Image (cartoon, rainbow, N blue to C red):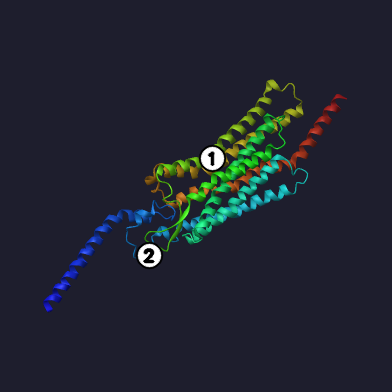
Amino acid sequence: MQASNTVAVLLVDLRNDSSLQQRSNRMLEIMPHAKLNHRIEDHRNLDDWSFYANQSVEPDGMPIDMRFNSGHILSIMVYSTLMVFSATGNIKVLSILAQRKVRATSRINIMLAHLAIADLLVTFLMMPLEIGWAYTVMWNAGDLLCRVMAFFRTFGLYLSSFILICISIDRYFAVLQPLKVHPHRAMLMISGAWFMSGLCSLPQSFIFHVETHPNYTEFYQCVTYHFFEEEIYEIIYNVLGMCFMYALPLVVILYCYGSIYYEIFSRTNPRNLESFRRSSIDVLGRAKRKTLRMTITIVIVFVVCWTPYYVMSLWYWLDKESAKNVDQRIQKALFLFACTNSCMNPVVYGIFNVRKKRTKSTVKLQEQRSCGSNLTMKV
């Protein structure tokens, strides 16, 4: 009896040793990936949850990418700051435009109002979502809200970019083809901007969905995993989004404002000044300088706000492994640049359009004085 007990104990020890050996071998296999997992601080940057399905749960709790960490603190602080600045600037622009009862139907005012509305959608829908999501880390709002908020995360950004295209095209026609006035051109372009924004954002509602982590079954996240059959399809989708949100507006802005400046520059050419009065030459000179400042400012602001985001995105899409070596705080800072465009739009377009209406009466008064001085000299 005692011998049989001894044999049973030895068998249990052998099984335990075998199990321990298997665990040790498994841990050796997982260790390189576990280090990678610890380096990733953003819970939405994991490659694929299926990789972690057969791994053992960490004894000290969830991995760092699934817990509140320094990356989330950075997101909350920056998004909160951007939210205050963007709300203040865009609400101010809307209030100024609302006070203009006489010129309430002008095309540029209507477009500036829609631009402010687009930026406010980013301010009050996307930014609070990012703040709350960074605070809770996992997604607690269910699958339906995951899909709805994924739609609105990009809708405001698309709308802002498309309204910038509308403003550029409208200024192009106003300067280069002033006689081709279409009574409904502004509303058609704005309606097209809203429609295209919804169309470009709609796939987000199908791509994003809620999944449960394979190991941490109480951890839910709004992710894109397992939607695209091949990685190349996801890259194509992301590149198309970049083209509509960044490349297309940049090309249109450069072409329209470059053409406007060239037209004004050609009119102020010394060979063409003989047919102009002195007052007209002064007005064109001021317009030339102002258009140059406006063009440079608009292009620089758009490029500075969007380029860091898409440079990091392209790097991640084309070479994911090397992109992961960049510190997550730097990655987050680059991604956050995209939202700064909503803060800068009211400043840039407010300076060159809203203030212009205030000083227009002053310009007319100066022209009248100039005409009066010419008449006095003739008498």
Residue 67 is labelled as none
Residue 167 drawn above or below residue 140: above
From the image, tell me which residue sits under label 1. Answer: 244
Name the residue at 61% across, 52% down.
85
The correct choice, above or below, for 365 with respect to 65 in the image is: above
Q: Position of residue 328 (x, y in %)?
A: 43, 52
Percent of width and height locating residue 314: 45, 42
Mark nearest the camera among 2 and 1 is 1
Q: Residue at position x 64%, y 39% from top? A: 167
Q: Secondary structure at mark 2?
A: loop
Q: Residue at x 56, y 51 (%)?
A: 152
- Marks 2/1: CA–CA distance: 42 Å
Disc 2 marks which residue? 61
The kind of residue on which mark 2 rests is Gly
What residue do we see at 40% from left, 44% from top? 231
Q: How many residues crowd mark 1 within 10 Å: few (<14), some (14–19), many (20+)?
A: some
In this view, which residue lies farthest toward the right?
379
Contact? badges 2 and 1 (CB < 8 Å): no
